Structure formats: C-alpha cells, structure tokens
Image (cartoon, rainbow, N blue to C red):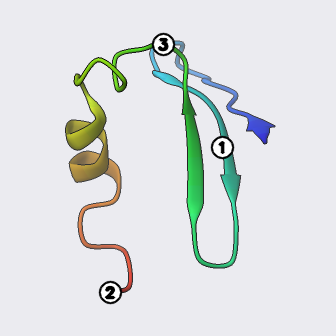
Amino acid sequence: MKIYQNVNGNSGIAGYEIGDTYIEVEFADTEAAQGHGLNSFINRRVKYLYEN
C-alpha cells in the first residue's frame, strides 16, 4: 500500500492501493469504522465512476 501524501494536510486517507479492478483505501482514523464519513467520501470522490 502506498502512503497518501496528503499535500493539503486535511485528508482522512492514510494510504491506497490501485489494482486492475479495485482501489483499496486505508483511512487515517477510525471515523469510517465508526460509521462516519465513508459514504460521503465515496459520493464526493467516486460516485458513478465505476463499472457495474
């Protein structure tokens, strides 16, 4: 997994890995596991940019 550079210093992402058919994201904190932010992140960054 690659470390996310977080140039602006305000990202909740710690790392990522991009495969042929997936992207794996590591969050910097536990907000997604606690039910905060994951849906919002996907809607802002991915939305409909994926194959069914």
Query: Which residue is at 34% across, 16% downward?
Result: 31
x and y, in percent, of residue 17 in the image? 70, 51
Q: Earlier in the sequence, mark 1 or mark 2?
A: 1
Name the one closer to the observer, 4 or 36: 36
The amino acid marked with disc number 2 is Asn
Label 2, label 3: how many angstroms apart (C-alpha)? 29 Å
| SS assignment at label 2 | loop
Query: Which residue has dot 2 on it?
Result: 52
x and y, in percent, of residue 30 in the image? 42, 14
| SS assignment at label 1 | strand
The amino acid marked with disc number 1 is Tyr
Left/right of residue 28 with respect to residue 34 in the rendered view: right
| SS assignment at label 3 | loop
- Quadrant (top left/top right/bottom left/bottom right) for the N terminus: top right
- Quadrant (top left/top right/bottom left/bottom right) for the C terminus: bottom left
Q: How crowded is the residue under tag 1: few (<14 C-alpha within 10 Å), some, or many (20+)? A: some
Looking at the image, residue 45 lies above or below residue 48: above
Query: Which residue is at 53% across, 19% downward?
Result: 8
Query: Which residue has dot 1 on it?
Result: 16
Name the one closer to the observer, 36 or 14: 36
Name the one closer to the observer, 2 or 36: 36
Query: Which residue has dot 3 on it?
Result: 29
